[in-house]
Image (cartoon, grey):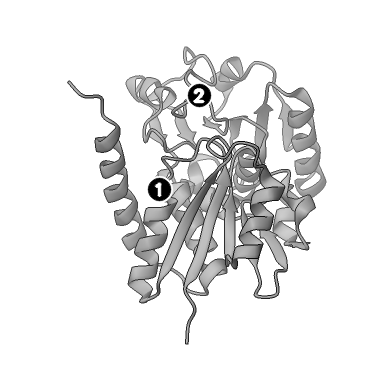
Amino acid sequence: MQRDILVGLIGANIQKSLSPALFADACAAAGRRGYYHLMDVDALAGRGLQDLLAAARTAGFAGVNVTYPFKEAVPALLDEVSADARQIGAVNTVTIGRDGTTKGYNTDRIGFRRSFEEKFGRDAVAGKTAVLVGAGGAGRAVAFALCDLGVATLLVSDKNAAQATGLAAALAAHFGQGRCRVESDPASALTTAAGMVNATPVGMTGFPGLPIATDTIQAHHWVADVIYTPLETDLLKAARAKGARVTGGAGMCVHQAVEAFRLFAGFTPDIARLHAAFAKAAVLRDRMTEPAE
């Protein structure tokens, strides 16, 4: 007899996450019963990453997703970390065995890579220069994905100079010197690049603003944002107004979820169905949060 699947998400500012809707749809399609629980540290006073991970293990969770701001902190708390996640230096998916053993994975890398190929195609970045704003947990996965896609030079910018330098060093170790360098002025750097990715929380609901000045965005650029709350950030709106090709974080969310759910439950959701489930859930979420007239 198959057991019910209990999983969750640990992070901050996650009340509008669409992961519960995606998991419910994937379970329904597979004929399984499952529940996806949000563990938001903004709503759980005094509870941190270690507390919530321990609680998930005690409660018999099959695993948890991990998001901002914990992706780089969680590996140290796990029994094992996959080779891919060790290379990236960040974990966003943790499986919990029946004996309580934990193993960390990174499904953001493949999620961003597949989403980028789906939206822009590999040729949009292969052999070209790209700008990455944000060198935290999400940014690290995006950086490795862009290198997988064949970026010639990746220009990394972060308010935390040590994070940017650390990411550049990690990429050099795996892809060779000269593949990545730290950039202090990403807006100016964009003038010689094919496109840019925002991998910071700036622009997400609760984190208003723009990650860079948008003056240098032009029609020939592509602009990607890992954020999907809202579906179109102010950055993407500004880029679209310039005629640039844009994509938000929806595709990355769906593609990484396929891999995460496979690890949690042993089945692979249908990608087309999951895209449709995401779109439906996003409409319902946004309708519920629209201000009253």
> Is 118 situated above or below 261?
above
Residue wearing tag 1? 18
* The residue positioned farthest toward the left in the image shown: 293
- Residue visible at 70% across and 75% down in the picture: 99
- Residue visible at 46% across and 70% down in the picture: 268
- Residue visible at 43% across and 44% down in the picture: 17
The label shown at residue 189 is none
Q: Amino acid under label 2?
A: Phe
Residue 59 showing in the rendered view: yes
Q: Quadrant of the C terminus?
A: top left
Count of numbered badges drawn on the protein: 2
Q: Nearer the viewer, residue 52 or 215?
A: 52
Q: Residue 170 in the image: state x and y as whole percent.
A: 79, 42
Q: Residue 216 in the image: state x and y as whole percent.
A: 49, 15
Q: Nearer the viewer, residue 156 or 81?
A: 81
Q: Amino acid under label 1?
A: Leu
| Left or right: where 47 falls relative to 272 | right
Residue 90 showing in the rendered view: no
Q: Residue 124 in the image: state x and y as whole percent.
A: 49, 40
| Left or right: where 207 falls relative to 85 | left
Residue wearing tag 2? 207
Q: Are marks 2 and 1 in contact (CB under 8 Å)?
A: no
> Is 102 situated above or below 141?
below
Q: Residue 135 in the image: state x and y as whole percent.
A: 67, 33
Secondary element under disc 1, as helix, strand or loop, is loop
- Residue visible at 37% across and 62% down in the picture: 24
| Left or right: where 254 falls relative to 278 | right
Q: CA distance from mark 2 to mark 1?
A: 18 Å
* The residue positioned farthest toward the bottom in the image shown: 1
Nearest to N terminus: mark 2 or mark 1: 1
